[in-house]
Image (spheres, grey):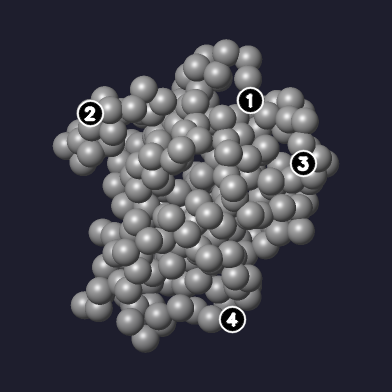
Amino acid sequence: MLNVRSVLVTGSNRGIGLELVRQLVGKRNTPEWVFATCRDPEGPRAQDLKNLAEKYRSVKILPMDIRDPSSIQAAAARVTDHLQGAGLNLLINNAGIVKPSTLESETAEDMSEVYKTNVIGPMMVSQAILPLLRKASQESPQKGMNCSKSAIVNMSSEGGSITNLLAWDLGHVVNYRCSKAALNMLTRCQALGFAKDEILCIALHPGWVQTDMGNFSEVQAPLAVDTSVRAILNTLGHLSEKDNGTFVNWEGAALPW
């Protein structure tokens, strides 16, 4: 069972990120701190998140543009201040974008922008938050690794599986697929690099979910957001060191790279 004192979710103003925040604060064992980041907390697209923050004191909304190193550092500093010497248990790198394209229409500009957001962003956020994750791991009396102790969860996609290429016939979206394949490699590198710190690192496919991003083609995504997130949180509660550096779906089943 997932039992975290503090969690940070990027891209939390809509879709999976917003639902993660909603279900985390709705748990019986609510985290003391849920840091919810998005690019524009004062904008109209963050209203649902602001409503949650007004209802639950544990939700702290922070501005963070994961493409901007100074924005990431500023958010990390504010998280550190809020935690008052404690570590951060769980980082969920959820923010991501996709640019609709075909193999022939893909552009260097779109490929670069998506890669910057979906790969470089999670890398920089993880680097900025790493001292807090290390502190949480060191402070924990628990042995081994789990998401309640200290973990990085990178929200990936089976669309980036080189073996499966989920839904290729419905959309090439080469920028997105390449970025998620690269994010998977980042996750493997993090798992190897942070193993000594006992920080669990995982790549997670949330399913093909009914979000603004999920419904990019004429076919509606099959999985409801709340269903996906409920399963994700359940899966995170069951992961251990044997899962470090793996690629799993929302229900915890292993996926091929």
Residue beneath disc 1: 87
Q: Is residue 190 visible?
A: no
Whole-Å distance between the Cαs marked 1 and 2?
Answer: 27 Å
**Circle nearer the N terminus (3, 1):** 1
Whole-Å distance between the Cαs marked 4 and 2?
Answer: 41 Å
Tag on residue 158? none
Secondary structure found at label 4: loop
Depth order, front residue of 225/131: 225
Residue beneath disc 4: 163
Say which amino acid is labelled 3.
Answer: Glu
Residue beneath disc 2: 42
Say which amino acid is labelled 1.
Answer: Gly
**Circle nearer the N terminus (4, 1):** 1
Say which amino acid is labelled 2.
Answer: Glu
Q: In the image, which is nearer the foreground, mark 3 or mark 4?
A: 3
116 shown above or below 55: below
Q: In the image, which is nearer the foreground, mark 2 or mark 3?
A: 3
Q: Say whether residue 14 is left or right of residue 205.
A: left
Say which amino acid is labelled 4.
Answer: Thr
Residue beneath disc 3: 198
Q: Residue 228: which quarter of the image? A: bottom left
Q: Residue 24: which quarter of the image? A: top left
192 shown above or below 221: above
Q: Say whether residue 4 is left or right of residue 229.
A: right
